[in-house]
Image (cartoon, rainbow, N blue to C red):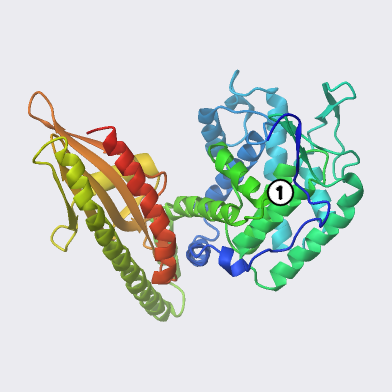
Amino acid sequence: MGDGAVKEIWRSSTGIADMEVDPRDLAASEIPGIRAVWREQRERLKGTKLLADFSERLGREWAIETGVIENVYDIDRGVTQTLIDQGFKAELLTRGSTNRPRDLVLRLLNDQKQALDGVFDFVKSERPLSTSYIKELHAALLRSQETTEAVDSLGRTVEIPLVRGEWKTQPNSPIRDDVTYRYCPPEQVASEMERLVAMHAHHDAGGVPAEVQAAWLHHRFTQIHPFQDGNGRLARAIASSVLIKHELFPLVVTRDDRTVYLDALEAADGGALKPLVDLIAKLQRVQFVRAADMSETVLSESATVSATLDGLIDAAARRATERRERHERVFRLAAGLTEDLKERLESISPDVTKALRRVTPSGESRVRVGEESTGHYYRSQIVENARHHLDYFANLADFRSWVALDMRWERRARLVFAIHGVGRQFSGSLICAPFLEFRDRDDDAETRSTLVPVSEDGFIFFYNETNETVLKRFRPWRERVLKATLDELSRNL
């Protein structure tokens, strides 16, 4: 599409459309597990500084990234992490770390953080989503933004005053790559927003899964584009309100997610909401891994205090029973994934051997599965992969298993799928984390190991999922890992 083409994002013939497929077919099976485990951990950490700090950092990240991906400002990555960890302090925004005036960026960040805090308060108050609240939220998010860009009659980009908390009065049809994107016209905005709110209320009352509700609400809101500016930030804020209401994490879309995020929105323009639902689920998994990494120390201290309470023995017995049941359920799921991996690797091993023998006549590959006596293998590689590549704490105390494809030719390599706990305390979830290791001898006959990541994230599964739903999620992920591995091998033969 180009040469002055027009893309109609909002359908003038129908307006926004309700769910076009059964919401259950769009749902992400891991979300109930994330909700259940996070609910329990949040309750046990309630009132602790650790939980407060985690929530603060999450809010700061949301506030920073929601503006970065809309090009409201830019902030260096290193400075971004410092701001997340230490707060929005003027001295942390050093010269050259942002492309806008420092004072303005700080005001924008604080406005966006306070707006997200307001979303939590909104959910806590149990107010229904309404057009009046959406206008309130817009005014809060853009409190310090006084102007926005527009195109004048001569086609020049100019700065004009920004009207906060009111529907747009002029069309906002941005042009990207010579394509004009047309949203709902101003005269239709009020009625369309009322329809949006009414449809959402129907979804909520009907038990539509939270991630599907959030994806639908986000996309249909962007189709309308009801405000002069700030529509992307508003869409992520109201989608976050849905997720927070259902005891999940706010929708943090970072600059690294921008391409897949825009692609998912474009797919939704074409009627396919599933990619956006899947992205929301993936971002929930990212936050869950971070939450699971919270220290066990506070939980232990809390348990010590609780020891003085009546009924401790009964509570401890119930907790032990629940923990044992969760172990058994998730361990059975792990056994199913192990068998699936073994069968899949055995199916490709002959072809891998054939390829290796074109390089070295003695080349071969074989599949190995960890047993009780070998389950401790690859400990250092698992820890390194978790810490430096996948960014989580690898818990090897409660459960560990692995399936490996060993390869020998002039070099040696192994693809390992390691299954173990995620976070410092077992919470009813496990992760399958793959890595590719090359082992070579240097000139001094010393073995040198190089670990290569073959996936940007591990595969997390939960005790309250079924084997069927886990395998349905797992197999596409497994195939992406295998493709990345074979691509890496082809470059290293």
79 w.r.t. 474: above or below: above
The residue located at (42%, 72%) in the rendering is 466
Q: Secondary structure at mark 1?
A: helix
| Residue 246, x across and y down, in percent | 62, 64
| Residue 65, x across and y down, in percent | 61, 38
The residue located at (52%, 67%) in the rendering is 32
469 horizontally vs 160: left or right: left
* 229 vs 339, nearest the viewer: 339
28 horizontally vs 424: left or right: right
425 horizontally vs 238: left or right: left
The residue located at (26%, 61%) in the rendering is 343
Q: Is residue 400 visible?
A: no
The residue located at (27%, 38%) in the rendering is 489
Q: Is residue 287 visible?
A: yes
Occupied quadrant, residue 197: bottom right
Say which residue label 1 marks.
235
Quadrant of the snapshot with the C terminus = top left
Q: Which amino acid, mark 1?
A: Ala
Occupied quadrant, residue 312: bottom left
* 77 vs 304, nearest the viewer: 77
| Residue 128, x across and y down, in percent | 77, 64
Quadrant of the snapshot with the N terminus = top right
129 horizontally vs 366: left or right: right
* 117 vs 267, nearest the viewer: 267
